[in-house]
Amino acid sequence: MSDTDIIDIAMQTMMVALKLSAPILVTALAVGFLVSLFQSMTQIQEFTLAFVPKVVAVGGAIVLSGNWMLHTLMTFTEQLFERIPSLLG
């Protein structure tokens, strides 16, 4: 196994991690921004008002993109396992 193989696997792993976390993080960011904007306009400073919508939105994002996330992770794992014999030889 060469240095380039290790770097390639590490790069692919980071890209898969970025792809899998993006729907959840973008959803939480967008909902957090909208709730903060609403709170600043109405001057309501309630913690649960910021927390509950984020939890619901992130749960919805997981439900909507969960199948795609699982498929992406399984494809990456299968490709990695198929690559093992060439890395050992």
Image (cartoon, rainbow, N blue to C red):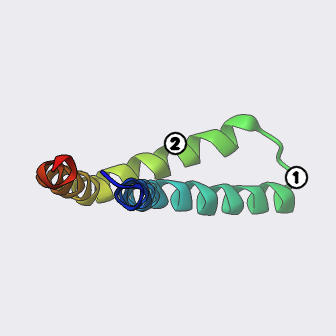
Q: Residue at x 15, y 55 (%)?
A: 86
- The image quarter containing residue 52 is top right
Please name whichever residue, 76 or 45, is drawn nearer the observer in this view of the structure.
76
**Label 1 residue SS:** loop
Q: Which residue is drawn at 77% across and 63% down?
A: 37
The residue identified by callout 1 is 43
Q: In this view, does 30 lie above or below 49?
A: below
Instruction: State how far apart marks 2 and 1 are (Cα).
Output: 22 Å
Label 2 or label 1, whichever lies nearer to me, is: 2
- The image quarter containing residue 75 is bottom left
Relative horizontal placement of residue 74, taking residue 51 as reference (left or right): left
Amino acid of disc 2: Val
Q: Which residue is drawn at 67% across and 36% down?
A: 48
**Label 2 residue SS:** helix
Q: Which residue is drawn at 47% across and 49% down?
A: 58
The residue identified by callout 2 is 55
